[in-house]
Amino acid sequence: MSDEVGTDPQFRSDVTVELVRSAAADSDVIWAARVSTAGEQSLEEVRKDPEKSKGLINFLMRDRHGTPFEHNSMTFFISAPIFVFREFHRHRSGWSYNEESGRYRELQPVFYVPGEERKLVQQGRPGKYEFVEGTEKQHAVVVEQMAASYQASYRAYQEMLQAGVAREVARAVLPVGLFSSMYATCNARSLMHFLSLRTKDDRATVPSFPQREIEMVAEQMEAQWAELMPLTHAAFNAHGRVAP
């Protein structure tokens, strides 16, 4: 088969997260909580400075009164390897997803390879293991073998498409290191649950051991959420990074 078939693969070691739409503010938590005691008068909280009620946000977070944190919405556009999305979709409550489809469009040859800073060696038994730095030789082997596999699989994909095979059939040869894209919509409560499991942070009262690639996505999502709801984010950190 000639190298003229298809497009040369591109390799990435990063992920991208863009906040494309949001209706999320600390005040959303306050008026949602105030309705319990103030009824229609809670509408007055919509335009008030949430700084004056940050004690309430901390109380709700500490005592795990979770529903006031659901009255907001954020939509992110995420580009990451397919294996990241397979982990992502385990988060179902409070999330909505729409992902790029290999049935309806030709998938582009963009593939994931670990960066030099990615720890490559697993030590210890399941449930009690850690990852440590790999050697330059190990990193070179990873990059070389991944690139060779990606090139072969994308060439096979292109050959089938050129032979008239349906996209939904031909895509079966493509690996989970292929980049995909999706919209993910959530509220602050569901995002906090996601962050509690998909980030490793010394402030967390319950330790988590996420795969680095999904943690890279989570870190970017958290940074953008923190700008929208700084008081809620601060309370999340102050109370052990446990979703209410």
Image (cartoon, rainbow, N blue to C red):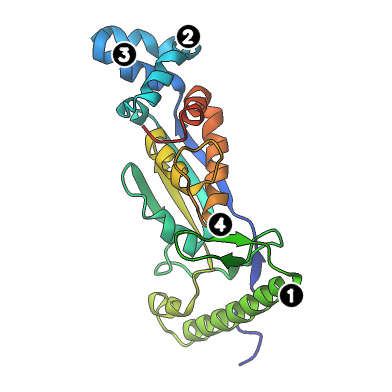
Q: Is residue 120 left or right of residue 206?
A: right
Q: Earlier in the sequence, mark 3 or mark 2?
A: 3
Residue placed most toward the observer, 125 or 137: 125
Number of other residues with Cα within 10 Å of mark 2, as a class: few under 14, some 14 to 19, many 20 or more:
few
Determine whether the residue tagged by mark 2 lies in a helix, strand or loop: helix
- CA gap, disc 2 and disc 4: 38 Å
Q: Residues within 10 Å of mark 3 (few under 14, many from 20)?
A: some
State the residue position of label 4.
213
Query: What residue did someone put label 3 on?
Result: 34
Name the quarter where the N terminus is drawn.
Answer: bottom right
Q: Residue at x 44, y 76 (%)?
A: 171
Return the residue at label 2: 52
Residue shown at 44%/36% (left/top)? 74
- Identify residue type, mark 2: Lys
Residue 34 position, x and y percent, is 31, 13
User: Would you say residue 8 is visible in this rendering?
Assistant: no
* Disc 3 to disc 2, C-alpha distance: 13 Å
Q: Around disc 1, counting alpha carbons within 10 Å, would you say few (fewer than 14), some (14 to 19), or many (20 or more)?
A: few
Amino acid type, label 1: Lys
**What secondary structure is marked by label 4?**
helix
Name the spot of residue 76 as percent of width and height, x first. 48, 44
* Most foreground residue, 127 or 181: 127
Q: Which sits earlier in the primary sequence, circle 2 or circle 4?
A: 2
Q: Earlier in the sequence, mark 1 or mark 2?
A: 2
Would you identify the image quadrant in which residue 193 lies? Answer: top left
Type of residue at label 4? Glu
